[in-house]
């Protein structure tokens, strides 16, 4: 299995143009990433306690990760006690992983920025897959996980 995952394609509907990428990541690949990263930027962070990005940030903080919320609409405001930044380039600290809570169309721009700042991992949340961004990130040496939630993965993976 190359880099801890395998890709399958699922034909949605009758058109061969409507193919969805399904990625099966090995448990060891996910566990390795969650053990290696220390600082995570959450792109699309929200101060709304009912939003998934807020809940995931909260869980990541509880697991000891350093979090950098990213949202231009919340720039300068604290979210869960962490200063929010407009974009990845505005963060002065080192970012190991970029967790994306944006639409699939926005992932390419986030990916380019993640590469520029030297992130090691690109992670997109449930329902978010962008094959071109995945390929670009991998070519730049980033590990990639798409269509997964780190909060869920942390709950089911016991870290040593």
Image (tube, rainbow, N blue to C red):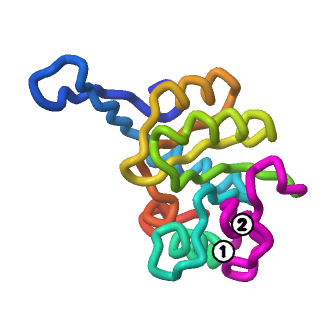
Q: Which residues are magenta?
A: 64-92
User: Is the C terminus in the top left, top right, bottom left or bottom right quadrant?
Assistant: bottom right
- The x, y position of residue 54, in whole percent, is 55, 73
Vertical placement of 114 versus 36: above or below? above
The structure residue drawn at horizontal position 83% and vertical position 56%, both measured from the top left corner, is 91
Q: At 70% across and 72% down in the image, what residue appears?
A: 64
Residue 46 position by quadrant: bottom right
> Which quarter of the rendering shows the N terminus?
top left
Q: CA distance from mark 2 to mark 1?
A: 7 Å
- Tell me, yes or no, if residue 66 can be seen here: no
Furthest residue to the front? Answer: 73
Res 81 → quadrant: bottom right
- Please give the residue where the numbered disc 1 appears in the rendered image: 61
Query: Which of the two discs, 2 and 1, labels the residue nearer the N terminus?
Result: 1
Q: Residue at x 37, y 49 (%)?
A: 127
Element class at badge 1: helix
Q: In the orientation shown, which residue stands out farthest toward the right?
A: 92
Identify which residue, 82 or 26, lies in the foreground: 82
Disc 1 residue crowd, few under 14, some 14–19, many 20+, Cα 10 Å: some
| Residue 73, horizontal then vertical, whole percent | 66, 65
- 88 in magenta: yes
**Residue with the most extreme top position:** 16
Residue identified by numbered label 2: 67
x%, y% of residue 4? 50, 34
Q: Is residue 69 above or below residue 13?
A: below
């Amino acid at each position: 299995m190359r880099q801890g995952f395998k890709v399958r394609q699922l034909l949605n509907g009758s058109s061969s143009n409507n193919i969805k990428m399904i990625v099966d990541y090995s448990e060891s690949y996910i566990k390795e990433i969650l053990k290696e990263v220390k600082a995570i930027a959450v792109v699309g962070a929200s101060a709304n306690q009912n939003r998934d990005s807020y809940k995931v940030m909260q869980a990541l903080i509880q697991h000891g990760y350093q979090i950098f919320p990213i949202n231009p609409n919340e720039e300068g405001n604290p979210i869960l006690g962490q200063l929010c930044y407009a974009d990845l380039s505005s963060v002065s600290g080192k970012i190991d992983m970029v967790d994306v809570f944006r639409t699939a169309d926005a992932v390419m721009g986030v990916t380019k920025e993640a590469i520029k700042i030297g992130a090691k991992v690109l992670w997109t949340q449930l329902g978010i897959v962008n094959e071109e961004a995945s390929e670009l990130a991998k070519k730049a040496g980033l590990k990639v996980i798409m269509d997964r939630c780190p909060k869920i993965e942390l709950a089911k993976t016991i870290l040593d």
